[in-house]
Image (cartoon, coloured by chain):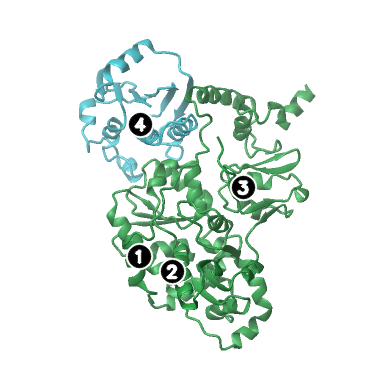
Amino acid sequence: MAEYWYFKDGFEAKAREFLANAPEPDLNLEFTVGKRDFVNAGKASAEIKLSLKRIGVEGAILRTVAISSYEAEINCTAHADGADILCNIYSNLVHVIFHDFGPGMKDIEQSMVPGFSTADDMVREMGFGAGLGLPNIKKNSDVMHIISGEGERTYLEILTYF
Amino acid sequence: MKEKKYFHAIKLVSENCTGCTKCVRVCPTQALRIRNGKVQLDDDKCIDCGKCVVACKFDAIHTCADSLEIIDKFKYKLAIISTSYAGQFRESVGYMTAKKALLTVGFDEVAEESMITETMSKIVREYIKKTDIRPIISSNCPAVVRLIQVRFPSLLQNVFHVEAPMSVLSVYYRKKICEEHNLQENEVGIFLIVPCVSQVTAVHQPQGTYKNLEDGAISVQDVYNHIIPNINKIVESDLQCDTYPKGLSWAISGAEAEEVNDGTLKTLAVSGIENVNDVLIKIENQRLEKFDYVVMNSCTNGCVGGVLNIENPFVATSRIRRLLRSAEHKNFHDEYFLKMYEQGKFDVLPLKPRSIMKLDEDIKTALVKMKKLKEIMDELPGLDCSACGNPTCQSLAEDIVNGEATINDCVVLLRKSIKE
């Protein structure tokens, strides 16, 4: 298993502290997305965005969460065999966890390179698979953490502070 | 703190309301409720789309356009007709007759939106090329602008921020008429002949404009009813007026997008409030950044679908398309208006958000409410039957957390508890 961390400048200390303490969320949402279920893909991220809108999260932040969670959700549908999604909402941040059902990533660093993709023809035909998913998640998050390995379930978590 | 009450161009007639919930279920912003058997409107949520007016089969939701009689208060009366007007009359009557007919019901002069839509298309193109924001959303439909204010405030920056064609014409004509006829500004009455409820609201409570530019908004239906008894006489009369068929494209959402597109732009036309809502969600998620310009109309097919029209939107579309096919370009003081635009005369104030999405101003309280809302949702049957008077179970749950309803309002749960 390999691990990948990304912290936006100034976020590492407080994010590590938060993850170490793992406090009880004020609100949590749970979803399951299916393999290649393109009809429903995007519903979980839409629900997450709506919930944040309802609690009054500001537009620009809302958009970054919408984009990062949408990209991750599409990854779970297109590249993995589906996933469990857990969204923990606090008054100062949102923590979204995507725990997919495999088959895992060979090389995380390589997957972070814009343009690199393992997508097959069917996925490309759906308009996905441009190799911009993970880089786009990184661009739209304060903290991004991946644990994966070939034949393993990939664990991706994203933190966004309000 | 609430500002002054928001004006809406619809009026609820309680005595006619049967509490059937038809209107409640079609409202795109969930602004309607049935309480104690009668319909109620939340002024903060309503965007004046007019869906409820069409849905009501009991005449309990009226539109409040101005009546034609109010024009008599003015010395000189100008009618500015919406582009959809030309599609309301059968072909044997014709577009020119329909237009000059307005001179027989009390107006001294008739202008029309289509005079200036070609010029506006140029302005839209220039505006798009000057900004990096994508996509630019057309501000043509007041209901769409209001939907963005209440549900998608983060997209207000995408809205085309220039005065609307009819308002631009109002400014031009008021000045011209005063000079030509030696009249004071308040002696000139300028009236829009409008196809929908949101345009009535826009006249009485404009968003972003510096002042009210028109003196009233009269429905296409009202004018039509006054004209039609004498239509044959008008066909034969020798009254004359110019027509601007090319500019009629703005009555149809797809045609407006084509008109604005000079071949270098990627445009998208969306009509029908559900589709508009869907596409706004996509724009908010930055899924449509490749588009330069999005024309959105709350009504089916565009303004031809407005509830204050006479003709079916598809029939009207066909008639207008026919006029468009044979039309030639005819610029109405193009240079003059373009210069006015360059001088900033068509500038509007930034649009203000009126968000209805927040459950509470305080994020902590909002989170508590969200949690409670989820618990209530688990309890409710999820049938969205509307028997409680709310459009959906979700909306009842929201009303409960906001203290505006109780779980006992759910008829299904009540029935279950009686059985037990």
- Residue on which disc 1 sits: B340
Q: Judging from the image, what is the letter of the chain drawn in cyan?
A: A
- Residue on which disc 3 sits: B26
Residue B328, horizontal then vertical, whole percent? 39, 78
Residues tagged 2 and 1 counted as in contact (Cβ below 8 A): yes
- Whether labels 4 and 1 share one chain: no
Tag 2: residue type? Tyr
**Disc 2/disc 1 C-alpha distance (Å):** 10 Å
Nearer to the camera, B102 or A104: B102
Nearer to the camera, A162 or A140: A162
Name the chain under label 4: A
Q: What secondary structure is marked by label 1? A: helix
**Residue that appears at 64% across and 81% down:** B231
**Disc 4/disc 3 C-alpha distance (Å):** 34 Å
**Disc 4/disc 2 C-alpha distance (Å):** 53 Å
Tag 1: residue type? Met
Residues tagged 3 and 2 counted as in contact (Cβ below 8 A): no
Q: Disc 3 vs disc 1: which is toward the camera?
A: 1
Name the chain under label 3: B
Q: Judging from the image, what is the letter of the chain drawn in green?
A: B
- Residue on which disc 4 sits: A72
Nearer to the camera, A124 or B214: B214
